Image: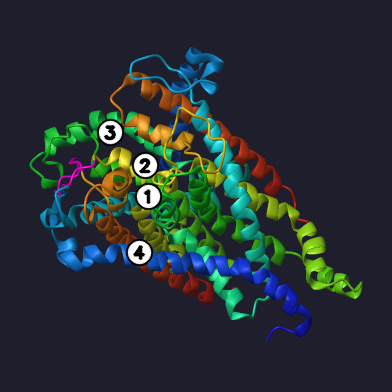
Amino acid sequence: MDAREIKEKIFLAVVVILSLAAVLPVFHVFLSVIWNGLGVIMKAGPRFLLDVPPAPNAGLGGIAPSLAGTLLLAVLSSLLGIPLSLFAAVFAVEFPDNPLAKGVRVLSKALLEIPSVVVGMLVYAILVVPMGRFSMLAGALALAIMMIPYVTTYVEQALEGVPFTYREAGFALGLSRPKVVFDIMVGIARRGILTGMLIGFAKVLGETAPLLFTLGRDRYNIPLGPLDYGDSISLLIFDYAQTPYANMHQVAWGAALVLTLMFLAVFLISRRFTEEVFL
Amino acid sequence: MIPKVDRGFFLSLLPFAAIIFALFALLAYVLAHESWPALERFGISLFTENVWRPSERGVEFVKYGLLAPLYGTLVTSLIAAAIALPLSVSTVFFMEEMAPHRIRELFSSVIDLMAGLPTIIYGLWGLEVMIPLLRGWVMSPLHEHLGFLPLFACDPLSGASFLAAGLLLAVMIIPFMHGVIKEAYRQVPRTYKEAALSLGATRYEYFRIMVSLIRPAVIAAVLLGLGRAASETVAVALVVGNAFNISPCLFAPGYTISSLIANQFTEASFFPLMENVMFAGSLVLLALGMLFSGIGVVMMRRVRELYGR
């Protein structure tokens, strides 16, 4: 074996080792969450999903208000964010030469570059301060802003992937432009659009930073209206991980398992959509 | 010009577009308006001094300087990008050139999962699992044996440190850097690859040729990764140690702009000017992010132009 071949062998070994090193941490993360979280949830039982959190050094309790908060926030922010993203994307795709539409296309992607904590500060300044209170609505607005870039990207791609002939066919039948877009194009591109919505949903399920200054962190009451204070699983983990109490750290691990499972569920569903052939 | 028949459609979609524009206008207004009092009061010293002296007594007693969080943001992001770059280049080469189909699919799913996993999960893992391991296996031995180097000079007390934050950030930005490099790698025309191989290049030489062909994308990946790392908030806040500290020692606790905001913004309204200082900090964060991603996008465009797709 000459020097070049030896070099090649070493190089290939290094690449494999580095590639494994790149993905091993995430396996370790999953195993840690399952290991620690499962122990906590086994001990706390199903009450973990139904109870309020414990006092310091007083058992495990549950995470019901935070769980409800996370689910409600995901729904509420989707209600705000998905229609906005959908129509903005249609606008960008339908009028590709219009400067306003070009601007929308660029800006909806540029939202990705705004740090999530800054989104939280923005909503704090424009909604929390004027209203004088934290609220589910403020949290949902912050999350809706977070999901716009993901949803618009997927919807734009999906709509642009529809062959032009379908559009022509629609026009040939005498359909109006909105009908062509919403009845034909959206129908054909539904898989991509749905994926985008799911990705956006998965994204906001786990977000923490946009909620820090918007939600109010009431983890003892389930929020009943959009103006109530609320909490999310992610915030609960963030706060409890920083407490000095062992039982709260355990609750954080249990909550982490719940959040991870929720994320995995949405992730796997969205995977099913993308794996199948487009159209 | 929009044709007349489409005008109604255009106008009915316009409000949604307007909301997106309005968001940016509001962001610009809020950041400028809120950070101005701090910039006016402290001037450039807000970014060149390390002081954190809040006071409830009155505006004349307070003094702030964000140098320590700026330093921490820079150091942790650089550590992260330095670690993540070789790893993400490797994953791209491994997946594109070496791995059998099955393993490639698996890898790609895992990397997608890494990208989407809630950051707070990384944070909790970093705090409770990674830091103890890192402290026991890396920090303490390095400090004992190489403590004469300024990098390792300080005793790793809790383990929460620049290094811990940098390492955790590296894990978190790998999928993004991987994505950028992969996109460019796939754009290199097949013929170039075949040319290199037909000349008898070993896979190592082939790799070097490929990397040189996508160099702008590698730079873009580093810049985008730096931007990502700088804006990451909660995971860093859990592992960076949260201390106003400027130290060359990697094992010392520090602060980053975003972790500072995460930790102190909720109480900031009790202290004069503190909120304004944090808005000024977020302005810097945003400016840095825009700059990095701007250059990154230009670099990626260069790759696309090079290979005409």
Q: Residue A6 location in percent, x, y? A: 38, 49
- How far is disc 2 from disc 3 in space, using C-alphas? 16 Å
Q: What's under tag 4, amino acid-wise?
A: Leu
Magenta segment boundaries in residue numbering: B242-253
Q: Considering the numbered disc 1 on the image, is that residue within a helix, a strand or a loop?
A: loop
Q: Residue A168 location in percent, x, y? A: 84, 74
Work out which quarter of the rendered image holds the C terminus of chain A and state it: bottom right
Q: Nearer the viewer, residue A39 or B81?
A: A39
- How far is disc 1 from disc 2 in space, using C-alphas? 7 Å
- Based on the picture, tell me whether residue B251 belongs to the magenta stretch: yes
Q: Is residue B132 visible?
A: yes
- How far is disc 3 from disc 1 in space, using C-alphas? 21 Å
Q: Which mark is residue B235?
A: 2
Residue mark closest to the camera, 3 vs 1: 1
The answer to whether the residue labelled 1 contacts the one labelled 2, judged by CB atoms less than 8 Å apart, is yes
Residue mark closest to the camera, 4 vs 2: 4
Q: Is residue B175 left or right of residue A182?
A: left
Q: What's under tag 2, amino acid-wise?
A: Ala
Q: Which residue is mark 1?
A: B232
Q: Nearer the viewer, residue A247 or B275?
A: B275
Q: Is residue A113 left or right of residue A167?
A: left
Q: Earlier in the sequence, mark 4 or mark 1?
A: 4
Q: Residue B107 location in percent, x, y? A: 54, 43
Q: Earlier in the sequence, mark 3 or mark 1?
A: 3
Residue at x 18% of width, y 62% of height: B46
